[in-house]
Amino acid sequence: MPAIDTVVGHAANPSSTFTAVTFNSGDSGVVRNFAQTDTAMLERITRVGGTSGAARVLSPLLHDNVRGITFTGSVETGRQILLGAAPGIKPAVLELGGKNPMIVFPDVDLDKATTGCIKGMNLARSMGQSCQSNSRVFVHDKIYDRFIEQLVVKVEKLKIGDPRDEKTVIGPVNNKRQFERILGFIDSAKSEGANLATGGKRAFNKGYFVEPTVFTNVSMKMRIAKEEIFGPVVSLFRWTDFDAMMAEANATEYGLTANIWTNDLTSANKTAKQVQSGLVWINGAGGRPPGIPFGGYKSSGIGKEGDLSDLLSYTQEKTIVTNLL
């Protein structure tokens, strides 16, 4: 394995990382940590160079010694990274955003499915600030009302507070900007006609605490149905026709994860094949055994992480043909 230099930045998005990789340098890596947005983080990394504007954001990628890039974060910043990588034809592995569907069939155990919905929202792990989180839940009409009832009861029992308290399930979101952004999405959902089933406001007078929020009667025309919120907010959709539901499940620019709930494995496998997501769970949400590849479709990214291909992305193949004299 060749020597590797890395320049890594961590943004406000808890999962955002930027890595510029140089091969065969033999030098030590440089690590920076910033509680900022992806773009601001890239600007901070390159500020020492004295450049300005977009050039400052992209300048690390233009360096001749940077031979490959890996990045986890927003789609917008991922696009900027590809622009920076393009002049040098540099390979990039991008793990970007998600607007992930949970698809619930009428034959499920409601208790397990609603518990799985909450687990898939990643409330305890990251307050919903995960690109893998459930944010759109498609529930069959036969169980839609009962699903909502059970989900709301369980969500309202979750303790919000100091993350140092072992009884706390939901802590604060990352920073003020993200806090205000989440509340902005909630306000837009209300104004566009979504029904607020629970939550929908800040939890305390101090800190960046947002109540876990459930919206029902959401349509794909609404902002919360199309854009990544990155917070403790989930939208419920009612479905009866499978093909129409699948069209809506796939009707975003994202394609990171999905989870499907049914006792009928024929329906589960049919749905898993049709949903445009790079990772699909059946009757579960979250977690991957070691060595399982992870990566998205469409604007959710390029390449895979977590398996052998992840390691190989840091290498370059060479073919040597030797003729004997």
Image (cartoon, rainbow, N blue to C red):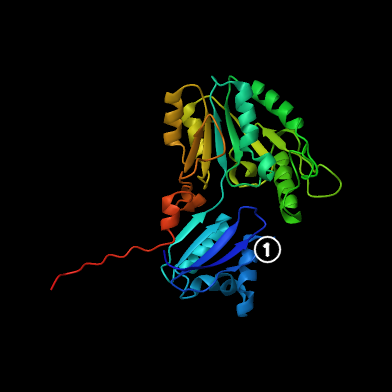
> What quarter of the picture does the N terminus occupy?
bottom left
- Residue 184 position within the rendered picture, expressed as x and y whole percent measured from the top left: 73, 48
- Residue 266 position within the rendered picture, expressed as x and y whole percent measured from the top left: 42, 24
Q: Is residue 297 left or right of residue 34?
A: left
Q: Is residue 275 left or right of residue 123?
A: left
- Residue 70 position within the rendered picture, expressed as x and y whole percent measured from the top left: 50, 60
Residue located at (53% from left, 29% from top): 283
Q: Is residue 218 visible?
A: no
The residue that mark 1 highlights is 34
- Residue 105 position within the rendered picture, expressed as x and y whole percent measured from the top left: 53, 24
Residue at the farthest right position: 205
Residue toward you, 31 or 279: 31
> What quarter of the picture does the C terminus occupy?
bottom left
Q: Is residue 65 above or below residue 294?
A: below
Q: Is residue 202 above or below residue 216?
A: below
At mark 1, the secondary structure is loop
* Residue 284: quarter of image: top right
Residue located at (31% from left, 65% from top): 318
Q: Is residue 147 above or below residue 259?
A: above
Counting the numbered discs, the total is 1
Q: Is residue 126 left or right of residue 29?
A: right
* Residue 216: quarter of image: top right
Residue toward you, 246 or 307: 307
